[in-house]
Image: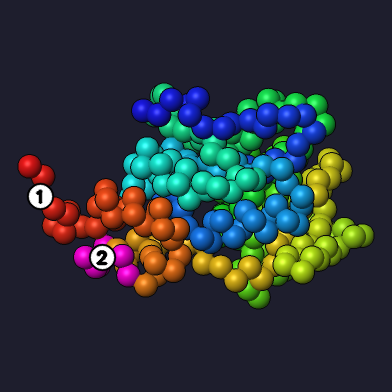
Amino acid sequence: MIDPGQGTAYPPHAGQRVAFFGGSFDPPHFGHIAIARAACAALHLDTVLFAPVGAQPLKPQGSSASFEERVAMTRLAIAGEVYFSLSLADAPRLDGTPNFTVDSLEKLQAALLPGSMLFCLIGADSFLALSHWRRAAEIPFIAPLIVASRPGERLDSLESALPAGLSIEADPETEFRTPSVQLYTYRIRNESGDSAPFYLLPDLEVEISASAIREEMANSASIGSKGKSLLPDSVREYIRAHDLYRPQSLAPAST
């Protein structure tokens, strides 16, 4: 198992703006990097915590690569990115039970230093499953959501994913724009009248699913065009060196 001390779980300074970015990262690719960069630019984040998940409760079949391999690939993918850190906040639990985002967010929130702000960065595909997450209606109030949407995907196509009891409305300052990134701001409200900001990054021209990469590798003796265009060189070399995502029959026989 990996020593939790090998990951950066918490911000080192007070007053930081930190985004938790959990996922399988199976493998981590340029889509993940682009989402994190856009969030940093739009919300002036100090740190994005890339947190490979040990066991996703909504994916009982598990990941193709082991947790250790996904951590190693994530570390390689974000190397040299000043605002990105590896986090083991979602490392496999000792009792073998699934990891729940709400638990990780609460632990991170409790460890934040004064004046710091925690966000939860997710892709649109994850947001569409939000209502199935544990204590889903509480998550936006523990850490405001930053949702990275696909081209043409607006809030009206995502609003139905909100957990029961939550509503959303436009914020008076509805749009933030830089030469490289656009951001829409909303407010989420619950039945008690509490509110929290909600941020939408629209029209990100990136592939945010790793399934096509894994499928291509499973059907080829080498990493093809999708892998080459979507994977950092260091991650691609790690996959090749460890024969990941290939059918067992294609892997060299062990001696």
Q: Does the magenta stretch include residue 20?
A: no
Where's residue 40, x and y in %?
A: 70, 52
Region of the chain picked out in magenta, as a range: 218-224
Residue 54, located in which quarter of the rendered image?
Answer: top left
Q: Pointer 1 and pointer 2: residues touching (CB < 8 Å)?
A: no
From the image, tell me which residue sits under label 1: 253
Q: Residue at x 81, y 58 (%)?
A: 185
Q: Is residue 219 magenta?
A: yes
Where's residue 71, x and y in %?
A: 43, 41
From the image, tell me which residue sits under label 2: 222
Residue 202 shows up from this direction: yes
Q: Taking 244 as reference, is 175 left or right?
A: right
Q: Which residue is drawn at 81% across and 57% down?
A: 186
Q: In this view, does 44 lie above or below 9?
A: below
Q: Taking 117 as reference, is 222 left or right?
A: left
Distance Cα–Cα, label 1 vs label 2: 16 Å
Residue type at numbered disc 1: Ala
Q: Is residue 173 above or below residue 138?
A: below
Q: What element carries label 1?
A: loop
Q: Which of 78 and 185 is in front in this view?
A: 78
Q: Nearer the viewer, residue 140 or 209?
A: 209
Q: Residue at x 10, y 45 (%)?
A: 254
Q: Return the residue found at the far left.
A: 255
Please identify the quadrant where the C terminus is shown.
top left
Residue type at numbered disc 2: Ser
